[in-house]
Amino acid sequence: MGLRSFFGILPPKLFYKDVSAPVELLPVPEKITLLWYRRTPSDLAVGVGTEVETGQDLARNGRGPFVSTVTGHVDEVNTFLGVDSREYLAVQISADQKDNFDPSLPAVEDLSEAKPETLRASVNRAGFTALKSIIRDPRVWPAIDALIISVLDLDPLSIVNQQIFRDNTDQVQAAVELLARTTEASRCVLAVPDNLAGIASKVSTGAATVAMVPPVYPNGLPEILAKNCGAGLLMKTYDTGFAGNTVVVSLEHALAMVSSLQTGRPMLEKTVTFSSGKGELQNFRVRIGTPVGEILKRASVNPQPKGKLILNGTMRGYACFSDEQPITATTESVHVQEPSEVFFFQNTQCTNCGKCNAICPVDLEVNLLGRLSEYGIYDKCRGLGIENCVECGLCGYVCPASRPLVQFLTRAKQGLSEEAQEPAGMEEALECNACGPVCPAIRLFDTESDKEDSPKA
Amino acid sequence: MKLLRTFTKGLWEELPPFRLVLGLCPVLAVTKSAETGLGMGLAVIFVLTCSNVLVSCLRNVIPRKVRIASYIVIIASFVVMVELASQAFFYKIYESLGIFIPLIVVNCIILGRAEAFASRNGIIPSALDGLGIGLGFTMSLTVLGAIREILGAGTLFGTQVMWSSFRPFTFMVEAPGAFISLGVLLALMNAFSKTQQS
Amino acid sequence: MKALDLTVSPAPHCHCGARITRVSYNILLALIPAMAMGFYYYGFDALRVVAASMGSAMLAEAAIQSILRKPITIADGSAAVSGLLLALILPASVPLYLVVVANFVGIVVGKQCFGGLGANPLNPALVGWAVIRITRAWAGYLDFDLALVNYETGFILQYPLAVLKAQGSAGVAHFSLMDLFLGKQVGGIGSSAIIWLLLGGLYLVVRGVIRWEIPLSFLIGVAVIAGIFWLGDRTSYGSPIFNILAGNVMIGAFFLSTDNASSPVNQWGMLVFGFCCGAMTVVLRSWSIYPDGVVFACLLMNLFVPLLDKIKKKQPLPPALSPVTPPVMSKSAEERSAS
Ligand code: SF4
Ligand code: SF4
């Protein structure tokens, strides 16, 4: 990984890795941990000691699905602080080596004839939590304008989707067609990095178009894909509704969805790329819920004290504090940094070099935003379009003053959303009048005495 | 005691150009030398004291709505006196001050004191206030003028103070030199009062 | 749980390795050939000025920062760069106290008063130069014709731009453009070494230290406006090529106007900035009392930078939509599909 630029004349570019690494399947570990965001034990249908089967829905009726990926018995149920500092409900299961599949998840019979509603219901039951927002009923939600199946990866150091595309080229066509039918999107796009053009030309995708994307970070981020190949805005769901019109699914998820429609089995395994400062990239396929430590053990790399263990890539990912962090359905990569590679941002002054502005994929004025946020002037950030920041991390990556720009931007976003929730009437409280007694202008023409008519006694 | 404070506050706490940052236009323009600074300061002392006294006398007579106009008439009368007197007796200074003597009429300090102090206080405090503020103004102008004259011409009140081969730093008597030296003095004063407070 | 004692921090977790120090040291490196030419022609005198200038710039920065109790940042090299740039536009014979005064005013008033590196609205080296230039009593020291009369350099000891001003284009006919390009002309210690400045500047562009927009549009600005003047009156104004090769234009285009803090950050802003600098240079050369106008042109345009920064591309993404509430709440839809 590195920054290559055309003699400094064009803004520097961060290229995705163009390598192939065979996927190695790891055995099921003794213990796995399943995470469920923002839930409590009362949402579970199982308790400590319950025997579970692979594919069994652990959620209480109607709250799920929340699928077990192994066969075994529940060891522990507690809350877990995720790497993103959010609280999760964690279910720890002691796994048997052999899988007993839960028979209550039937395969869809006669796939080519099935109605979209049937397909959606089946995918929903299989518990694609990360994708749930897209598999919904178009009679209730407006249809998706564009569906993008992405062969690009999220991070320059991750080669998961690339590798899956190389290995499973023959399944791509069926997957694209089935997914287009399931989601009923008006337009379907397969986004392929330029370096895989040779393989892509062998795939005939029917109704879907193939978009060739330069393999430059951050072109693989869903927001940027939606902008460049889709209908403009990535779809996001909120408590109160949704915004956007484009949905991005990675190829791995798309294939898993198809196989779940065919076999009735939910997505049980996730491929992750392992990388460290030295050595080649490696791809591992593990059970969802496997602790990161298992991957480290297999790669025989031990994180040093004061080093970093990063999930989901160095640009947007999270640093873990322990190797028990489980792999989830959205984990793309594991990266280990030596203590000497760990970079510390500093709050030095911006030198106004403009490198951050030049590299920002959504053309924000990052130098200004950084300074505004540093001094807490959040409302001005909104006028500069801070909502468009996709937190790709590039501005912090290139800043010669080592300013923590992404952190500043995130703080401003958070400040803005907190402000929006603030009760009205704050302005009155802020009228402290401390400036009054020292202001020369007020002394000269103070408004109070102008109102009076008669001379002062 | 209170009267004494009324007088002394103009010498430090409310030292005109530095503390109030008012009336900067003449401050920047006439401090090319200590002499012109002093001359301007004396003119301002006279006008300020006299107008403060008169405004204070008339404070119950002047209607609020036309007060600014009335103050300007009062101030202008004294300014004309000063102008004629200096024309008669100190022609050199009159020449070098030029337009800035008539401009005392609209000097913010004088108008400001009339509005903020003289129109609300008795005659004696007003006189002391005018005297104090005027003295402070004179002091500041003389100091600023002296600094600029020494560096920019090598002289002080017209006599050579630097060594004979000194090539003067004439930048200081130009307009940018005025801004920079005013800023530096202001910064030093603020730094000094900060150490005083803590 | 096994304690691993790992470092935890938010993303991004890596950095491309660029540093402010590297920017400064690259600029110093790019200026070395031009400086060496100065040493070659003017000998020890040039060395003396360069040493005094860089030394006093760093001293000024360290002094003001220790007085203000700020961290001392002379190691980032930015003070050394402005000291060197100032020295390179001065004649070799200049008395050292001038250099010291210029650097102190430039660094203290022009830079640290505004908050140090990155916050200065004007290029500190140019502020220092302007201060001693407008000091009338010292003007003789900065007049190249008077100052450099005693040197044996092997080329015409006349400042081309002053000759142009006095005698019109007929007077400069005997300056060969090749000599000007090779740096065989009277001028500042480094600012006359045109070819070396060009090479140094191109090195900086290639390394990505400075962006190409400003130098290019600066040179275009000089050429276009000088061309207009020249076509209008060939007897009193120099040709565009002469204007580019004489005086401070090359150092101005690549080094003086590209100071990060005092130039715009967006592409169109930079192009306009550079063009206006070049245009202003020619206008000042033609109509002001000074033979060269690069420094004043750059200072003037520095003041427009906040305005030029407002020129930018349209936001390519539509503003984020506020969530639309679906006709039926998601909860009930979910429950329906689950049951
Ligand atoms: S993280 Fe920085 S570079 Fe990336 S989108 Fe946000 S502001 Fe732009
Ligand atoms: S990259 Fe860093 S130093 Fe350069 S403008 Fe952006 S914030 Fe400032």
Image (spheres, grey):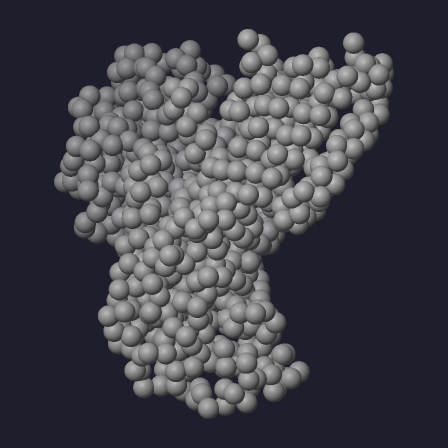
| Residue A455 coordinates in the image, percent (x, y) | 82, 14
Q: Quadrant of the C terminus of chain A?
A: top right
* In the image, residue C130 above or below residue C182: above
Q: Is residue C233 visible?
A: yes
Name above or below for residue C126 compared with residue C46: above
Residue at image position (46%, 43%) is: B147
- In the foreground, C1 or B9: B9
- Looking at the image, the residue that sits furthest to the front is B89
Q: Which residue is at a point 57% across and 70% down the rendered structure image? A: C289
State which quadrant residue A169 falls in.
bottom left
Task: Please name whichever residue, A276 or C118, is drawn nearer the observer in this view of the structure.
Answer: C118
Residue situated in front as seen by the camera: A74 or A448: A448
Left or right position of C320 against C123: right
Q: Is residue A263 above or below residue C335?
A: below
Place of residue B174 in the rendered image (x, y in percent of width and height, measured from the top left): 54, 53
- Asked if residue C259 can be seen in this view, the reply is no
Q: In this view, does B11 lie to the left or right of A406?
A: right
Residue at 62%, 79% (x, y): give it.
C229
Q: In the image, is A427 to the left or to the right of C88?
A: right
Q: Position of residue B131 (x, y in %)?
A: 62, 24
Residue drawn at the location 43% of the way across and 56% of the way down: B168
